[in-house]
Image (spheres, helix red, strand yellow):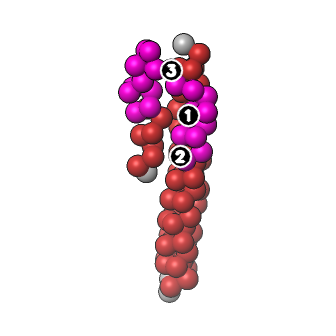
Amino acid sequence: MRLLLVLPVLLLSTAPAMAVTPEECRTALDALLDEIETNRSYAEDIYRESLKAADTDYEREVWQAEIDKVYDQEERERGRADHMWRDCMAATEG
């Protein structure tokens, strides 16, 4: 989650004389997307192990719901990353 701050910090720390380049925006977005994927994969692995160890149908349902939530969270984070990337690209034009 630490990379969620990359694009806003890049935008805020850029003085008017120092323009953000599209390449910097793309690099920051790629790093952010990689981090989002890593976080999702890590959480999913943990929940899948718990799912395997579940003894009851109820526990299995709970762990499956948690896995589904991980994917939902990933989609929300990707949406936020896209908004940050668009803001960063707008800063390259201004």
Mark before the other along the chain sequence, 3 or 1: 3
Residue 51 in picture, x, y percent from top left: 54, 78
Cα separation, mark 3 vs mark 1, equals 10 Å
Residue 48 in picture, x, y percent from top left: 55, 75
Mark 2, secondary structure of its residue: helix
When the figure is inspected, residue 51 is found, relative to residue 25, above or below; the finding is below
Mark 1, secondary structure of its residue: helix
Residue at horizontal 57 percent and vertical 20 percent from the top: 92
- The quadrant where residue 16 appears: top left
Badge 2 is on which residue?
32
When the figure is inspected, residue 94 is found, relative to residue 70, above or below; the finding is above
Badge 3 is on which residue?
19
Q: Are marks 1 and 2 in contact (CB under 8 Å)?
A: no
Badge 1 is on which residue?
24
Residue at horizontal 42 percent and vertical 24 percent from the top: 14
> Which secondary structure is most common in the magenta stretch?
helix
**Which segment is the magenta one?**
9-31
Nearer to us in this view, 77 or 6:
6
